[in-house]
Image: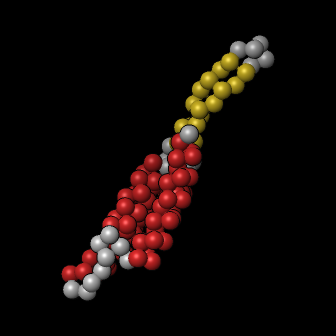
């Protein structure tokens, strides 16, 4: 369940990132920044539940923890830094008086 949420958040993050660059939107950029930061923090440990049937017909349930996804954390952190720098550049353009979309 959690791995499908991570995949869904990555897809939503990429779509919002593309839309924020296309529309030059400060709000979409901020939401995308939060998504990338949340993914970079939350990817370090993902729990995957499992159910197994042993040879004596007993059912065993448990949780497998994946803890070796730290390289994706750095990738998501890099994307968050890119979005943060983009938010700063949009904010400076708005303070200069150029008309940009907030939404």
- Residue 41 on image: x %, y %: 42, 51
Quadrant of the image for the N terminus? top right
Please indicate, yes or no, whether residue 84 appears anywhere in the rendered image. no
For the point 49% across and 54% down, the residue is 9
The extreme right residue here reads 55
Please indicate, yes or no, whether residue 37 appears anywhere in the rendered image. yes
For the point 66% across and 26% down, the residue is 51
Q: Is residue 7 left or right of residue 80?
A: right
Front in this rendered view, residue 33 or 99: 99
Q: Is residue 34 left or right of residue 12?
A: left
- Residue 95 on image: x %, y %: 20, 81
Front in this rendered view, residue 52 or 72: 52
For the point 57% across and 45% down, the residue is 3
- Residue 44 on image: x %, y %: 49, 47
- Residue 98 on image: x %, y %: 26, 86
Say if 50 sits above or below 8 in the image: above
Say if 89 sits above or below 52 in the image: below
Front in this rendered view, residue 88 or 96: 96
Based on the displayed image, in which of its 4 quarters is residue 52 positioned? Answer: top right
Based on the displayed image, in which of its 4 quarters is residue 103 positioned? Answer: bottom left
For the point 56% across and 52% down, the residue is 7
Number of marks in picture:
0
Say if 85 sits above or below 57 in the image: below
Q: Is residue 37 left or right of residue 43?
A: left
């Amino acid at each position: 369940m959690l791995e499908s949420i991570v995949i869904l958040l990555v897809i939503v993050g990429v779509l919002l990132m593309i839309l924020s660059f296309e529309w030059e939107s400060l709000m979409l950029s901020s939401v995308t920044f939060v998504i990338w930061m949340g993914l970079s923090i939350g990817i370090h440990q993902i729990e995957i539940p499992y159910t197994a049937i042993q040879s004596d017909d007993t059912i065993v349930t448990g949780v497998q923890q994946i803890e070796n996804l730290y390289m994706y954390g750095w990738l998501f952190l890099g994307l968050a830094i890119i979005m943060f720098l983009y938010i700063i550049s949009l904010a400076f353009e708005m303070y200069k008086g150029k008309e940009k979309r907030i939404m």
